[in-house]
Image (tube, helix red, strand yellow):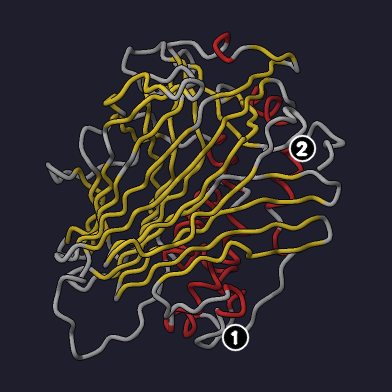
Amino acid sequence: MRASKSNFLTLWILVLLAMPYLMIPTASAWTAGDEEAIFGHTFEEEYWTNDSLFIEGDTGNGSLTASFVNVGDFQAFLIAFNEFNHTDGTQMIAPYQLFGMHFITPGNQEVFIGAIFAFLLVHNETYGNNQLPDMGTGKDSAWYVVPLANSTTWPEYTPSVVPIPAAKIADNHYRMGMHYYNLTCRIVDANNPLGFWLSLALPILEVVISELTIQYDIVIEATGEVHAESLYTIGQVQKLKYFGVEKPPSEMIISSMEVSAVHFMSVFASEYSVVGTTDGNTIVPPTSTTPMDDNITIQVGATHERAFDLGFGREYNLINETTDAVVSSGLTALNTLLGVRLGDLILVLWQAPLSAWIFAHMAYGLSTQLQSTYATVNAMVNNVNTAFTNTNWWYAVTFPTWNGLRVEQDPVYVAYTSLGVAADDSGGGFIALLLIVAGILAVIWILRRRS
């Protein structure tokens, strides 16, 4: 892998990945079973992983991993980017992924939930003494952690990605996920537009983190509840360079700095509301950082049936990777809803169009409804912006005590499905996994609303 010929590596990758229609074939009609030609598996299988989904073009090629679990009227999936290889030898490993679930509630409502891991955010806690990422003029300073994954900044750290294949651990217990190792990251200014673009284009501040692992454990209870626990590991900051000069990470990562894992969640349902789990009061999408003292519940249908809880594992551990010592355990993570900033959208925009193509092929192949609505897969991709109603929620899990050490923590998703209800002999057929489209394309929907 050769060094980039330009300091604008990030920018051309963002532009290139936002133009997938120049790189991929146009699909036409679809019949059941055609998905095997793309994914190497069918949607009738219980579980599978394909980590070699290749897309090639004149300027480079990329690959993705898809994992899939199918139990009755419940499906879960993980779609993740592996790497993108440009023809000049530069490479990008992007730890962005979408985890989704589709299910039928006991009240026969169809629900689609998607959560995109967007980025890591570091902020300096100086405003309000609330340990939250309060961003804005006169408030906390903040920085995006943007992986660039090259082997030239620190040749001793070779970036790699290792999928965790979907596996059946026990009856009604499944596991899948992704490992990313030795991620070179550019630290991007989140405080003003000029600083954002300069630090995105130029390697002003760079770090390498040892690991980013996101693993999903899915347990289907006899009651029909599905617990999808996402196990997060954010590796320790190993090295740091400021304007090309190497410095000890401790010189720039001070005790008042905190790290957050930021996610984007999308819901697709004919009628839904978002409320606090305990009080049942409707939650209005925030315009600034809002602390969450309770889990989030998604209610669907005219009867406001409880369909989904977004819960957080409130504790995390800090580990010193040099000594393998647990520095602190049982620390409390904070949960917040975030008002969306332009920089947030820019940093996830690049994945939307390319993902839309592959997600559309999944959904179109599974759904007779989509096949009757759109004559071709391509027609669906071109029109989904107006065909779906999406909710958009940005939430963060903040780790107040950090110091650049290894973080291990676990938010939990709970779906309320019909799997605990006796099967209806009247049939019902095969249910579409539309979440795959609804989740990722919510990014496009938001941007077009803002334009």
Which residue in the rendered view is the most extreme toward the front?
323
| Residue at x 65% of width, y 78% of height | 27
| Type of amino acid at the residue the image marks with label 2 | Leu
As drawn, 297 above or below 400? below
Q: How many residues crowd around disc 2 within 10 Å: few (fewer than 14), some, or many (20 or more)?
A: some
User: Considering depth in this image, is 268 or 224 the residue closer to the camera?
Assistant: 224
| Residue at x 16% of width, y 66% of height | 222
**Residue placed under numbered mark 1 in the picture:** 29
Relative to 348, 399 lies left or right = left
Q: How many residues crowd around disc 1 within 10 Å: few (fewer than 14), some, or many (20 or more)?
A: few
Instruction: Give percent across and percent down for residue 143.
Output: 55, 24
Label 1, secondary structure: give it.
loop
> The N terminus appears in which quarter of the rendering?
top right
| Residue at x 70% of width, y 57% of height | 62
**Residue placed under numbered mark 2 in the picture:** 9
Q: CA distance from mark 1 to mark 2?
A: 38 Å
Instruction: Give percent across and percent down for residue 129.
Output: 32, 12
| Residue at x 41% of width, y 14% of height | 125
